[in-house]
Image: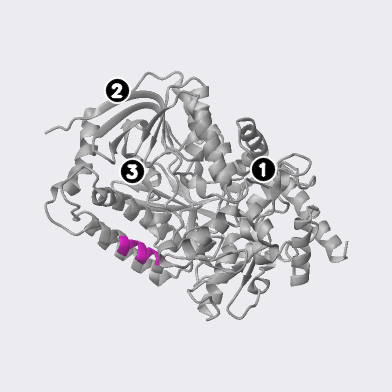
C-alpha cells in the first residue's frame, strides 16, 4: 500500500540551517533561485553557534604583516599539507571580504580603539587573525545570517529530517524527508541540492556535538554515489568540560587559551612546554617568562612580537599532550587537565569570555575568575567529508553540492581554530552561487513516486517489526565502542576489532524496535540515525586502518612518527558500490608553482621574525 506524502518544487534545496546552509541559501535566493532550507532541528540551534572563539580572516587589523599568503601557509601547514590547496587559496583570499560583508549585514564584531574589527590570536595562526564577538562569535554570525535570510524570501522547513536523495540517472533531483513531530512524509523536487548538514561527532561518546550530529549529510552523499575523503581525520578539541558527567564533552573555547589561559597538570607544571614538536619549534615560547610577556603585550593592546605560548599549538598536539599527561597519572581529579585564566582578572574575563564564565558557573559551580577549569579532549569536528570541486562545491554526483563541515578539502589532516567559521561563509556562498547557476537552464525534475515510496518504506521499517532491541541501547553502546577503539589514539588491532563490532551493530540496527508510533517518537529517530552512524563509523574506521602513519587528527600508536619527510602523499577516498563501502588511495595533486613560492616566502618571513626575537628584538 502506498503512503501519502506532500510534494514541493524548488530550484535549490539546502539541507541544513547552520552558517554554511544559511549562506548558501542566501546566495542562491539572491541569484534568483526559488530556494528552501530543510533543517533537522530549529533555527538558531546549529553547531555554528558553538564556534565561540572567532572567524579567521587576514583583515590585517591586528598586524599589518598578515595577508592571504600567510593565512594560506598556516592553513596548509596546519592541515599537515593534505588540504586541497585550491580551496585553501580561495579561502585565504576571500575570507576578509566575507567577514566585511557580515559586518555590513549587521554583525557586531569586537572593535579596537581605532574602531576596526579586533582580532585575537589562535592556535596555528602566525598573526592575531580571528574576528570575534567576545566568546560568542558563531552565535552572532547565525543571528546575522538568519536576519538576512528572512529578507531573501527563503522557505524554511524546520524539524524535518531528510532520509533519501532522489535521482534521475546519475544526477540528484530532490530529496525525501519526514517531520520529527508528526512523522508525515514530504518529497522535494529540486534542480540542485546543497548538503550543509554539519559533522559526525555524535558517533563518539565524549563529543561537543548535540543530538543532530549523526552524519546525515555524509551518509546521504555516500548512499547517492558521492565520494568521501579524509574520513580518518577527526579533531578531538583539546578542551571540553570533563565534570560533572552531565556536561562531559561540552566545548571550552580555544579563546580561553587565546586570551592567555595556562594548562597545568596535577603537579602544577605547565606541561605544554614539554610537547612542542620539532616542526613548531621557533614558533612558540620556550619559557614561562616569554609566554607571560606575550600575555602582557596582548593585555596592553600592543602587537604580539614574541613567540606564542605552547598552549596555542595546533589542536591535535594539545589534545594528545593532555591525553599523555592523564595516562601518565598526572591528570586532574576527573581525568583531564587544569586550564587557568584567573590571572587575567575578573574584569578582563567578563569582558572577553562572558559565555565561558557563565557556562562554568551554571554547569560546574566553578568561578573561572578565581579557580582553574578541568578540561579534556572531546570529539569536536571531522576534517573529512564529501569530496567537492574547489571552485563550485559540486560533489562527484551532478546536482549535489556540499559546504561547511559536511564537505572536505579545506582542512586536510587538521583544522585550525577559526577556519571553520570562515569556511562556512566562503564556501557557503560558492555552493549557493553555483547551485543556483546550475538550476537556471534546467527544467523542473518530476518526482519519481517509486523512489519516494521506497524511501518511505525504509523509514517505516523499524516501526513495523513488532519486536526487537531498544535502539537507544545500541546507540549508546556503539558510541562507547567508537570512543574506545577509534578514539584519539588508534592501533591496528583495535581498528580491526571495531570493524567487526560495526558488523554486529549493523545487524542489531536492522532488528531494533522503537515502538509503533510516528508521533514524537525519539526512539524511531534514533533507529533511523543508527543506519547513518553505522555506515559513517565504518568509513572513518576503514580510513583510519588504511592510513599507516600519525598525522594531524589521526594518531596511530603503532606508527608514531611525525616527521614530514616520512609522511605519505595519499588521500583515502571512500564510496559505496552495491551496498558495500569501498576504499582506495589517491595521490595528492602537486601544488601550483606560484603557491609553492608563496609558501616559501612566508616561511622565510617567519624564520627571519624568529631570528629577530631570538636576538631579543
Q: Which mark is residue 486?
A: none
From this view, report whether residue 202 is shown above or below residue 392: below
Residue 161 visible in rendering: yes
Q: Nearer the viewer, residue 549 or 505?
A: 505
- The magenta span reads 476-483
Q: Quadrant of residue 58?
A: top right
Q: Mark 2 highlights which residue?
A: 446
Eye-nearest disc, 1 or 2: 2
Q: Earlier in the sequence, mark 1 or mark 2?
A: 2
Q: Are marks 1 and 3 in contact (CB under 8 Å)?
A: no
Numbered disc 2: secondary structure: loop
Which residue position holds label 3?
Answer: 223
Crowd tier of the residue under label 1, counting other residues whose Cα lies within 10 Å: few below 14, some 14–19, many 20 or above: few
Q: Is residue 139 left or right of residue 134?
A: left
- According to the image, label 1 marks what residue? 592
C-alpha span from label 1 to label 3: 33 Å
Gap in angstroms between the C-alphas marked 3 and 2: 21 Å
Distance (Cα) linking label 1 and label 2:
43 Å
Q: Nearer the viewer, mark 1 or mark 3?
A: 3
Assess disc 2: are there few (<14), some (14-19) or many (≥20) residues with their C-alpha within 10 Å of its C-alpha: few
In this rendering, is residue 377 above or below 327? above
- State which quadrant residue 560 falls in: bottom right
Q: Residue at x 36, y 41 (%)?
A: 40
Q: Position of residue 186 (x, y in %)?
A: 27, 32
Q: Residue at 17%, 47% (x, y): give it.
A: 463
Amino acid at each position: 500500500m502506498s503512503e501519502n506524502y506532500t510534494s514541493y518544487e524548488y530550484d535549490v534545496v539546502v539541507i541544513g540551517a547552520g552558517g554554511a546552509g544559511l549562506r548558501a541559501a542566501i546566495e542562491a535566493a539572491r541569484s534568483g533561485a526559488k530556494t528552501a532550507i530543510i533543517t533537522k532541528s530549529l533555527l538558531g540551534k546549529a553547531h555554528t553557534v558553538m564556534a565561540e572563539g572567532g572567524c579567521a580572516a587576514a583583515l590585517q587589523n591586528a598586524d599589518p604583516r598578515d595577508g592571504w599568503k600567510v593565512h594560506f601557509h598556516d592553513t596548509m601547514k596546519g592541515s599537515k599539507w593534505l588540504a586541497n590547496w585550491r580551496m585553501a587559496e580561495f579561502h585565504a583570499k576571500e575570507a576578509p571580504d566575507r567577514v566585511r560583508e557580515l559586518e555590513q549585514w549587521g554583525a557586531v564584531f569586537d572593535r579596537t580603539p581605532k574602531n576596526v574589527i579586533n582580532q585575537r590570536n589562535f592556535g596555528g595562526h602566525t598573526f592575531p587573525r580571528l574576528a570575534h564577538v567576545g566568546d560568542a562569535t558563531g552565535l552572532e554570525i547565525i543571528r546575522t545570517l538568519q536576519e538576512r535570510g528572512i529578507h531573501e524570501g527563503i522557505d524554511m522547513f524546520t524539524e524535518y529530517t531528510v532520509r533519501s536523495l532522489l535521482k534521475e540517472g546519475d544526477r540528484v533531483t530532490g530529496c525525501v524527508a519526514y517531520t520529527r513531530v508528526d512523522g508525515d512524509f514530504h518529497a522535494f523536487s529540486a534542480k540542485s541540492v546543497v548538503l550543509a548538514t554539519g559533522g559526525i561527532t555524535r558517533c563518539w561518546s565524549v563529543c561537543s556535538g548535540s543530538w543532530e550530529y549523526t552524519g546525515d549529510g555524509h551518509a546521504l552523499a555516500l548512499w547517492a554515489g558521492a565520494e568521501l575523503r579524509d574520513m580518518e581525520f577527526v579533531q578531538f578539541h583539546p578542551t571540553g568540560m570533563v565534570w560533572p558527567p552531565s556536561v562531559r564533552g561540552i566545548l571550552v573555547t580555544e579563546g580561553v587559551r587565546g586570551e592567555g589561559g595556562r594548562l597545568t597538570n596535577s603537579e602544577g607544571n605547565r606541561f605544554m612546554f614539554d610537547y612542542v614538536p620539532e616542526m613548531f619549534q621557533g614558533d612558540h615560547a620556550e619559557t614561562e617568562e616569554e609566554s607571560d610577556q606575550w600575555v602582557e603585550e596582548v593585555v596592553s593592546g600592543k602587537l604580539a612580537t614574541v613567540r606564542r605560548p605552547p598552549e596555542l599549538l595546533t589542536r591535535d598536539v594539545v589534545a594528545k599532550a593532555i591525553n599523555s599527561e592523564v595516562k601518565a597519572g598526572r591528570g586532574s581529579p576527573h581525568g583531564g587537565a587544569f586550564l587557568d585564566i584567573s590571572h587575567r582578572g575578573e574584569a578582563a574575563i567578563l569582558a572577553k569570555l562572558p559565555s565561558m564564565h557563565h557556562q562554568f558557573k551554571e554547569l560546574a559551580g566553578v568561578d573561572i575568575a578565581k579557580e582553574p577549569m578541568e578540561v579534556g579532549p572531546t570529539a569536536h569536528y571531522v576534517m573529512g567529508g564529501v569530496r567537492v570541486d574547489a571552485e563550485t562545491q559540486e560533489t562527484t554526483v551532478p546536482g549535489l553540492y556540499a559546504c561547511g563541515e559536511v564537505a572536505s578539502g579545506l582542512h586536510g589532516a587538521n583544522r585550525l581554530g577559526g577556519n571553520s567559521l570562515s569556511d562556512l561563509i566562503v564556501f557557503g556562498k560558492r555552493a549557493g552561487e553555483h547551485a543556483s547557476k546550475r538550476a537556471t537552464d534546467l527544467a523542473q525534475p518530476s518526482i519519481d513516486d517509486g523512489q519516494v515510496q521506497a524511501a518511505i518504506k525504509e523509514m517505516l521499517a523499524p516501526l513495523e517489526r513488532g519486536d526487537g532491541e531498544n535502539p537507544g541501547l545500541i546507540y549508546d553502546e556503539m558510541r562507547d565502542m567508537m570512543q574506545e577503539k577509534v578514539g584519539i589514539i588508534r592501533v591496528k588491532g583495535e581498528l580491526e576489532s571495531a570493524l567487526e563490532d560495526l558488523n554486529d551493530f549493523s545487524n542489531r540496527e536492522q532488528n531494533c524496535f522503537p515502538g509503533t508510533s510516528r508521533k514524537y517518537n525519539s526512539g524511531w529517530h534514533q533507529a533511523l540515525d543508527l543506519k547513518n552512524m553505522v555506515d559513517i563509523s565504518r568509513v572513518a574506521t576503514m580510513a583510519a586502518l588504511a592510513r599507516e602513519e600519525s598525522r594531524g587528527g589521526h594518531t596511530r600508536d603503532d606508527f608514531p612518527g611525525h616527521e614530514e619527510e616520512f609522511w605519505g602523499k595519499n588521500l583515502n577516498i571512500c564510496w559505496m558500490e552495491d551496498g558495500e563501502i569501498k576504499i582506495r588511495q589517491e595521490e595528492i595533486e602537486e601544488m601550483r608553482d606560484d603557491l609553492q613560492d608563496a609558501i616559501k616566502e612566508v616561511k622565510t618571513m617567519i624564520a627571519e621574525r624568529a631570528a629577530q626575537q631570538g636576538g631579543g628584538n
